[in-house]
Image (cartoon, rainbow, N blue to C red):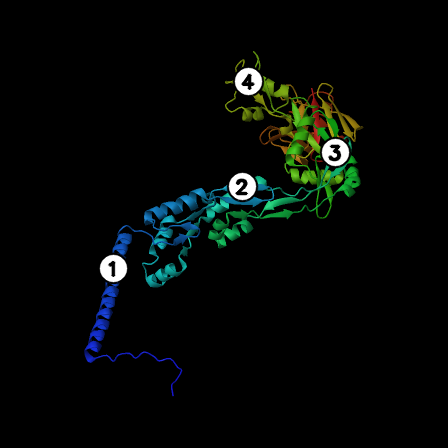
């Protein structure tokens, strides 16, 4: 029976010789392949060796190495350093952003720089240091490696720049203040200010200088400042009342027995107004310069020969003046000069000016009768120098040499009058403005061996030799002198009174009372 399946061709059986030939061919093929692989490997090694030599000998950075966004592939280390310095340190700018404007500056203005040489060294080190295999593999797979540049910051430079911006743009808060305008006090409303916060501005730069450089910007932090007081309108009435109060200065000239009174104008007092923005307290507080300027203005009323004597302690004076609303000062006469005329004597000049001889000599060193020549200019001390004690203003003793008479005044009214005797021609009583300086119930004059009851010293004719006012003197022998001589010159320079009058004057005229002796 015949099968319908197709008949497969029969493969001829291989002989042993044929098997050996086939095995030999396979062996030769593997050998060729192995030799090819070895050759390729050697070629690769050779190429790599040559490439490595070339890269190292020329200090070339490997392909794919970048510094942030700057590609340094195949650049030498020197080229890379120059590129980094040019791009990061010279071409890059940083924008300072502030509410009052924007400023574009070079990073070096902020003291911010990239170390180009060290950053280039980092880029060159890729694939050459301990992680070289990993880095090369990364380059092979990722095609790039990014290097972080090395940044440095000079904080002093940064701080100086930001502070200079602050100094230029700071706007302190404006406190509410008051002003006199069109004759009325007005309150000017305060407003907010703004100050650059130097420390807060520098904080991101100090913390992450490289980030600031990469972002190309640095915000200027500005903080608001507020006035302590926005509105002082509620104080206007109080200020008006304060300024409208009378404030006067009373001055007394003890030499001429003249009184002056000046009032401080509202306009001047307005300049003295002070306001405490916290407590809202209002007061007047003139400066020492303002007081002295005011006195200088009033001095113009006195002429060139005298001026207001500025109190020694102006602070206490101002406080007392403002509290009591008036104050008293003394007017002082200035020193003057005298040009010696032909025939004048030193003693005559002393008598003419009512200035004891020794005081003239003290004011003019070397001045004697022998050095007094015509045309010489000598200094005449201020007559106020003869009033060493605080002046008692409401009492005054007036003596007339020509009339041999005395009047006493209290509060501007005549209190008493007396016949007196002054010094004889060879020992005259000096005319001038003096002062009760001492009290002695019974003084002894050794030069004349006499006692002077109720003695009141008024000036030193010579140091240690005091002329004064006293009752009729008593000799040691018990003889009372000059009782019959009152009304004509009789003494050795003192002013003589009868005993009851001298006693009464002794207890009435305290030290400091001015004694005016007229020719």
Determine contact: label 1, label 4, CB under 8 Å: no
Residue 471 showing in the rendered view: no
Which residue is disc 4 drawn over?
377
Q: Which residue corresponds to the image point at 74% horizontal and 19% vertical from the top-left?
A: 403
Q: Looking at the image, is mark 2 or mark 1 nearer the viewer?
A: 1
- Distance from label 1 to label 4 (Cα)? 120 Å
Of marks 2 and 3, the one in the foreground: 2
Residue at far left of view: 17
- Please, what secondary structure does the residue beneath circle 4 have? strand
Say how many tags the image has: 4
Between the residue at mark 2 and the residue at mark 1, the CA separation in whole angstroms equals 59 Å
Give above or below for 162 relative to 369. below
| Alpha carbon separation for disc pair 2 and 3 | 42 Å
- Seen from the viewer's position, the closer of residues 418 and 85 is 85
Dot 4 surroundings within 10 Å: few (below 14), some, or many (20 or more)?
A: some
Question: How far apart in space, not on screen, are marks 1 and 3 (Cα)?
Answer: 100 Å
Precedes in sequence: disc 4 or disc 2: 2
Q: Disc 1 vs disc 4: which is toward the camera?
A: 1
Residue 197 in picture, x, y percent from top left:
57, 48
Q: Which residue is mark 2?
A: 103
Q: Secondary structure at mark 1?
A: helix
- The tag on residue 43 is 1
Which of the two labelled residues, at mark 1 and mark 3, occupies the earlier sequence position?
1
Q: Mark 4 and mark 2: span between their CA atoms?
A: 72 Å
Q: Between 252 and 204, which is closer to the camera in this rendering? A: 204
Which comes before the other along the chain, label 1 or label 4? Answer: 1
- Determine whether 295 is above or below 150 in the image: above
């Amino acid at each position: 029976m015949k099968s319908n399946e197709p008949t497969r061709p029969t493969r001829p059986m291989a002989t042993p010789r044929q098997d050996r030939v086939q095995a030999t061919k396979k062996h030769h093929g593997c050998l060729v392949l192995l030799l090819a692989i070895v050759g390729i490997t050697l070629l690769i090694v050779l190429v790599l060796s040559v490439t490595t030599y070339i890269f190292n000998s020329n200090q070339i950075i490997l392909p794919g190495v970048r510094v942030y966004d700057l590609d340094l592939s195949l650049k030498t280390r020197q080229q890379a350093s120059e590129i980094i310095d040019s791009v990061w340190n010279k071409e890059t700018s940083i924008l300072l952003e502030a509410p009052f404007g924007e400023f574009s500056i070079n990073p070096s203005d902020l003291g911010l720089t990239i170390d180009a040489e060290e950053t280039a060294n980092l880029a060159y080190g890729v694939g050459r240091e301990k992680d070289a295999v990993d880095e090369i593999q990364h380059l092979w797979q990722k095609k790039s490696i990014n290097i972080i540049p090395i940044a440095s910051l000079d904080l002093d430079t940064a701080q100086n720049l930001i502070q200079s911006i602050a100094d230029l743009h700071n706007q302190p808060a404006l406190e509410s203040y008051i002003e006199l305008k069109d004759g009325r006090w007005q309150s000017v409303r305060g407003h907010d200010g703004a100050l650059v916060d130097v420390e807060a501005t520098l904080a991101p730069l100090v913390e992450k200088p490289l980030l600031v450089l990469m972002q190309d910007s640095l915000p200027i932090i500005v903080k608001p400042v507020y006035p302590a007081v926005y509105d002082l309108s509620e104080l206007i009435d109080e200020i008006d009342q304060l300024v409208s109060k009378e404030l006067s200065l009373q001055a007394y000239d003890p030499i001429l027995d003249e009184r002056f009174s000046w009032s401080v104008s509202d306009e001047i007092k307005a300049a003295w107004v002070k306001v405490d923005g916290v407590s809202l307290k209002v007061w007047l507080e003139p400066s020492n310069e303002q007081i002295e300027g005011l006195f200088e203005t009033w001095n113009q009323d006195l002429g060139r020969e005298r001026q207001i004597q500025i109190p020694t302690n102006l602070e206490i004076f101002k406080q007392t003046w403002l509290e009591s609303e008036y104050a008293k000062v003394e007017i002082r006469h200035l020193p003057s000069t005298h040009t010696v005329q032909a025939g004048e004597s030193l003693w005559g000049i002393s008598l003419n000016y009512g200035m004891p001889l020794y005081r003239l000599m003290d004011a003019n060193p070397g001045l004697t009768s022998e050095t007094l020549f015509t045309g010489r200019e000598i200094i005449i001390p201020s007559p106020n120098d003869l009033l060493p004690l605080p002046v008692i203003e409401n009492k005054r003793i007036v003596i007339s040499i020509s009339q041999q008479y005395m009047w006493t005044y209290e509060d501007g009214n005549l209190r008493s009058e007396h016949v007196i005797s002054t010094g004889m021609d060879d020992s005259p009583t000096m005319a001038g403005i003096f002062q009760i300086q001492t009290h002695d119930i019974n003084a002894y004059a050794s030069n004349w061996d006499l006692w002077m009851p109720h003695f009141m010293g008024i000036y030193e004719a010579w140091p240690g030799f005091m002329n004064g006012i006293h009752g009729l003197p008593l000799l040691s022998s018990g003889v009372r002198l000059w009782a019959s001589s009152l009304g004509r010159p009789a003494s050795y320079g003192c002013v003589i009174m009868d005993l009851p009058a001298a006693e009464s004057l002794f207890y009435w005229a305290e030290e400091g009372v001015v004694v005016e002796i007229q020719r």
